[in-house]
Amino acid sequence: LAGVSGNGQRELAEVIFGLRPATGGTVSLEGKNITNKPPSTLNRIGLSYIPEERMVDGVIKDFSVAENLILQQHGDRPYADGIFLNSRVIRRRCADLIQRFDIRTPGQETPIKSLSGGNIQKLVLARELSREPRVLIAAQPTRGVDIGATEYIHQRLLEQRAKGTATLLISEDLDEILALADRIAVIYEGQIVGMVDRHQTSVEELGLMMAGVRKETEGTQNAVGSI
Protein backbone atom coordinates (compact mmCIF):
# COMPACT_ATOMS: atom_id res chain seq x y z
CA LEU A 1 0.00 0.00 0.00
CA ALA A 2 1.72 3.17 -1.23
CA GLY A 3 0.82 6.69 -0.25
CA VAL A 4 2.01 9.86 1.38
CA SER A 5 1.68 9.60 5.17
CA GLY A 6 -1.58 10.94 6.51
CA ASN A 7 -3.86 9.56 3.81
CA GLY A 8 -5.43 6.82 5.91
CA GLN A 9 -2.76 4.12 5.94
CA ARG A 10 -2.32 4.08 9.68
CA GLU A 11 -6.06 4.03 10.32
CA LEU A 12 -6.49 1.13 7.90
CA ALA A 13 -3.76 -0.93 9.56
CA GLU A 14 -5.18 -0.26 13.01
CA VAL A 15 -8.68 -1.28 11.92
CA ILE A 16 -7.39 -4.54 10.44
CA PHE A 17 -5.44 -5.33 13.62
CA GLY A 18 -8.25 -4.41 15.99
CA LEU A 19 -6.63 -1.31 17.45
CA ARG A 20 -9.28 1.02 16.04
CA PRO A 21 -13.00 0.16 15.77
CA ALA A 22 -14.35 -0.33 12.27
CA THR A 23 -17.36 1.89 11.58
CA GLY A 24 -18.25 0.19 8.30
CA GLY A 25 -17.34 -2.77 6.16
CA THR A 26 -15.77 -6.00 7.38
CA VAL A 27 -12.34 -7.52 7.88
CA SER A 28 -12.17 -11.20 7.00
CA LEU A 29 -9.51 -13.90 7.04
CA GLU A 30 -10.08 -17.03 4.97
CA GLY A 31 -13.79 -16.30 4.87
CA LYS A 32 -14.14 -15.69 8.61
CA ASN A 33 -15.25 -12.30 9.91
CA ILE A 34 -12.56 -10.93 12.24
CA THR A 35 -13.83 -7.34 12.36
CA ASN A 36 -13.07 -5.61 15.68
CA LYS A 37 -11.44 -8.69 17.20
CA PRO A 38 -8.84 -7.70 19.83
CA PRO A 39 -5.14 -7.90 18.90
CA SER A 40 -4.54 -10.80 21.30
CA THR A 41 -7.13 -12.87 19.44
CA LEU A 42 -5.73 -11.86 16.07
CA ASN A 43 -2.23 -12.88 17.17
CA ARG A 44 -3.51 -16.33 18.06
CA ILE A 45 -5.18 -16.86 14.69
CA GLY A 46 -2.12 -15.80 12.73
CA LEU A 47 -1.91 -12.02 12.35
CA SER A 48 1.19 -10.00 13.23
CA TYR A 49 1.65 -6.24 13.10
CA ILE A 50 4.79 -4.12 12.81
CA PRO A 51 3.54 -0.59 13.61
CA GLU A 52 4.98 2.56 12.09
CA GLU A 53 5.63 4.19 15.49
CA ARG A 54 7.82 1.56 17.12
CA MET A 55 8.50 3.50 20.34
CA VAL A 56 4.81 4.25 20.83
CA ASP A 57 3.03 1.15 19.57
CA GLY A 58 5.77 -1.45 19.06
CA VAL A 59 7.53 -1.62 22.42
CA ILE A 60 7.19 -0.51 26.01
CA LYS A 61 10.23 1.72 26.35
CA ASP A 62 10.74 1.18 30.09
CA PHE A 63 10.73 -2.62 29.68
CA SER A 64 13.80 -4.73 29.01
CA VAL A 65 14.77 -6.38 25.75
CA ALA A 66 13.50 -9.73 27.05
CA GLU A 67 10.20 -8.30 28.28
CA ASN A 68 9.57 -6.69 24.90
CA LEU A 69 10.45 -9.87 23.01
CA ILE A 70 7.64 -11.77 24.74
CA LEU A 71 5.18 -8.87 24.85
CA GLN A 72 1.57 -10.11 24.65
CA GLN A 73 2.87 -13.68 25.00
CA HIS A 74 4.11 -13.62 28.59
CA GLY A 75 0.96 -15.32 29.88
CA ASP A 76 1.07 -18.13 27.32
CA ARG A 77 2.87 -21.44 27.38
CA PRO A 78 5.76 -22.14 27.35
CA TYR A 79 6.61 -18.74 28.87
CA ALA A 80 4.22 -19.19 31.77
CA ASP A 81 2.86 -22.01 33.85
CA GLY A 82 -0.31 -20.71 35.41
CA ILE A 83 0.54 -17.48 37.18
CA PHE A 84 4.29 -18.19 37.21
CA LEU A 85 6.76 -17.16 34.52
CA ASN A 86 9.22 -19.76 33.28
CA SER A 87 12.38 -17.67 33.42
CA ARG A 88 14.63 -20.36 31.96
CA VAL A 89 12.44 -20.81 28.89
CA ILE A 90 12.17 -17.04 28.44
CA ARG A 91 15.95 -16.56 28.65
CA ARG A 92 16.59 -19.36 26.17
CA ARG A 93 13.97 -18.10 23.72
CA CYS A 94 15.20 -14.51 23.91
CA ALA A 95 18.83 -15.57 23.41
CA ASP A 96 17.77 -17.44 20.28
CA LEU A 97 15.85 -14.47 18.85
CA ILE A 98 18.65 -12.01 19.66
CA GLN A 99 21.10 -14.20 17.77
CA ARG A 100 18.84 -15.06 14.83
CA PHE A 101 17.77 -11.48 14.21
CA ASP A 102 21.16 -9.92 14.94
CA ILE A 103 19.85 -7.63 17.69
CA ARG A 104 22.82 -5.68 19.05
CA THR A 105 22.26 -5.39 22.80
CA PRO A 106 24.49 -5.63 25.89
CA GLY A 107 22.06 -8.18 27.33
CA GLN A 108 18.50 -9.35 27.69
CA GLU A 109 17.88 -7.14 30.70
CA THR A 110 19.01 -3.98 28.91
CA PRO A 111 16.24 -1.36 28.75
CA ILE A 112 14.88 -1.29 25.21
CA LYS A 113 15.10 2.51 25.08
CA SER A 114 18.91 2.33 25.19
CA LEU A 115 19.12 0.47 21.86
CA SER A 116 19.49 2.11 18.45
CA GLY A 117 16.42 2.57 16.27
CA GLY A 118 17.54 -0.18 13.93
CA ASN A 119 17.98 -2.68 16.74
CA ILE A 120 14.63 -1.79 18.27
CA GLN A 121 13.01 -2.37 14.88
CA LYS A 122 14.80 -5.71 14.55
CA LEU A 123 13.43 -6.67 17.96
CA VAL A 124 9.88 -5.85 16.86
CA LEU A 125 10.49 -7.83 13.67
CA ALA A 126 11.84 -10.79 15.67
CA ARG A 127 8.85 -10.86 18.00
CA GLU A 128 6.26 -10.62 15.25
CA LEU A 129 7.89 -13.04 12.80
CA SER A 130 8.58 -15.59 15.54
CA ARG A 131 4.82 -16.02 15.83
CA GLU A 132 4.93 -17.64 12.34
CA PRO A 133 2.10 -15.42 11.07
CA ARG A 134 -0.21 -16.20 8.20
CA VAL A 135 -0.75 -12.47 7.66
CA LEU A 136 1.82 -9.76 8.38
CA ILE A 137 1.10 -6.03 8.39
CA ALA A 138 4.35 -4.08 8.10
CA ALA A 139 3.81 -0.32 8.36
CA GLN A 140 6.76 1.87 7.37
CA PRO A 141 9.13 -0.93 8.50
CA THR A 142 12.37 0.86 7.62
CA ARG A 143 11.51 4.41 8.63
CA GLY A 144 14.30 6.00 10.65
CA VAL A 145 16.78 3.11 10.46
CA ASP A 146 20.21 2.97 8.80
CA ILE A 147 21.07 1.34 5.49
CA GLY A 148 22.31 -1.88 7.07
CA ALA A 149 19.14 -2.35 9.10
CA THR A 150 17.02 -1.46 6.07
CA GLU A 151 18.65 -4.16 3.96
CA TYR A 152 18.27 -6.68 6.77
CA ILE A 153 14.57 -5.90 7.23
CA HIS A 154 13.96 -6.13 3.48
CA GLN A 155 15.60 -9.55 3.37
CA ARG A 156 13.47 -10.81 6.24
CA LEU A 157 10.28 -9.57 4.59
CA LEU A 158 11.25 -11.29 1.35
CA GLU A 159 11.85 -14.51 3.28
CA GLN A 160 8.36 -14.27 4.75
CA ARG A 161 6.91 -13.79 1.28
CA ALA A 162 8.78 -16.88 0.09
CA LYS A 163 7.25 -18.84 2.98
CA GLY A 164 3.78 -17.87 1.76
CA THR A 165 2.99 -15.27 4.41
CA ALA A 166 0.45 -12.76 3.09
CA THR A 167 2.17 -9.44 3.71
CA LEU A 168 0.62 -5.98 3.63
CA LEU A 169 3.55 -3.59 3.26
CA ILE A 170 2.63 0.03 3.95
CA SER A 171 5.25 2.52 2.80
CA GLU A 172 5.78 5.91 1.19
CA ASP A 173 9.21 4.83 -0.08
CA LEU A 174 8.58 3.95 -3.72
CA ASP A 175 11.92 2.17 -4.15
CA GLU A 176 11.00 -0.02 -1.20
CA ILE A 177 7.53 -0.70 -2.58
CA LEU A 178 8.88 -1.64 -6.01
CA ALA A 179 11.58 -3.87 -4.52
CA LEU A 180 9.29 -5.86 -2.22
CA ALA A 181 5.69 -5.77 -3.43
CA ASP A 182 3.92 -7.95 -5.99
CA ARG A 183 0.78 -5.82 -6.32
CA ILE A 184 0.64 -2.17 -5.39
CA ALA A 185 -2.43 -0.24 -4.27
CA VAL A 186 -2.16 3.53 -3.88
CA ILE A 187 -4.16 5.37 -1.24
CA TYR A 188 -5.05 9.07 -1.41
CA GLU A 189 -7.31 10.88 1.05
CA GLY A 190 -8.62 7.60 2.40
CA GLN A 191 -9.47 5.97 -0.93
CA ILE A 192 -7.68 3.57 -3.25
CA VAL A 193 -6.97 5.47 -6.47
CA GLY A 194 -5.26 2.66 -8.33
CA MET A 195 -3.94 -0.88 -8.15
CA VAL A 196 -1.10 -2.08 -10.36
CA ASP A 197 1.37 -4.92 -10.84
CA ARG A 198 4.88 -3.87 -9.85
CA HIS A 199 6.24 -5.10 -13.19
CA GLN A 200 3.79 -2.91 -15.10
CA THR A 201 4.28 0.42 -13.37
CA SER A 202 6.96 3.01 -12.63
CA VAL A 203 8.04 5.45 -9.96
CA GLU A 204 6.54 8.24 -12.08
CA GLU A 205 3.12 6.59 -12.35
CA LEU A 206 3.02 5.74 -8.65
CA GLY A 207 4.06 9.29 -7.79
CA LEU A 208 1.17 10.69 -9.81
CA MET A 209 -1.32 8.41 -8.08
CA MET A 210 0.09 9.37 -4.68
CA ALA A 211 -0.64 12.98 -5.66
CA GLY A 212 -4.27 12.12 -6.41
CA VAL A 213 -4.26 11.09 -10.05
CA ARG A 214 -6.58 8.14 -10.44
CA LYS A 215 -5.54 5.04 -12.36
CA GLU A 216 -8.46 4.14 -14.60
CA THR A 217 -9.18 0.55 -15.54
CA GLU A 218 -8.94 1.45 -19.22
CA GLY A 219 -5.39 2.66 -18.67
CA THR A 220 -6.15 6.39 -18.72
CA GLN A 221 -5.52 8.75 -15.82
CA ASN A 222 -7.71 11.58 -14.61
CA ALA A 223 -7.35 13.92 -11.69
CA VAL A 224 -9.39 12.87 -8.70
CA GLY A 225 -12.04 15.34 -7.65
CA SER A 226 -13.66 15.54 -4.23
CA ILE A 227 -13.46 12.23 -2.36
Image (cartoon, rainbow, N blue to C red):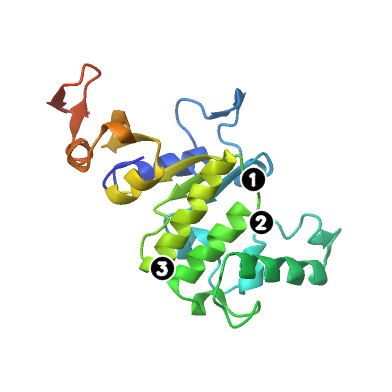
Mark 1 sits on what residue? 43
**Compared to 46, does 108 lie above or below?**
below
Q: Where is residue 7 in the image (x, y as percent from the top left)?
A: 29, 42
The quarter of the picture where the C terminus appears is top left
Q: In this view, does 112 lie above or below 84?
A: below
- Mark 1 and mark 3 lie on one chain; the one further toward the N terminus is 1
Q: Residue 98 carries which label?
A: none
Looking at the image, the residue that sits furthest to the top is 218
Tell me, for residue 72, which label it has, or none.
2
Relative placement, left or right, of 147 versus 93 is left
Q: What residue do we see at 47% from left, 65% from top?
A: 55
Task: Classify residue 9 by image quadrant.
Answer: top left
Tag 1–tag 3 contact (CB < 8 Å): no
Nearer to us in this view, 190 or 79: 79
The percent position of residue 1, horizontal first and vertical second, equals 36, 40
Query: Does any portion of residue 62 appear in the rendered image?
Result: yes
Could you give the CA–CA distance between mark 3 and mark 2, rounded to whole angstroms? 28 Å
Q: Which residue is drawn at 74% across and 72% down?
A: 91
- Specify few, some or many for label 1: CA neighbours under 10 Å numbering under 14, 14-19, or 20 or more: many
Q: What residue type is labelled 1?
A: Asn
Q: Quadrant of residue 123?
A: bottom right
Q: What element carries label 1?
A: helix
Q: Give the number of marks.
A: 3
Q: Badge 3 is on which residue?
A: 148
Give, as a three-letter code, the residue at label 2: Gln
Q: Which residue lies furthest to the right in this view?
A: 82
Q: Earlier in the sequence, mark 2 or mark 1?
A: 1
The residue furthest left is 223
Crowd rating for badge 2 (residues with CA inside 10 Å; few <14, some 14–19, many 20+): few
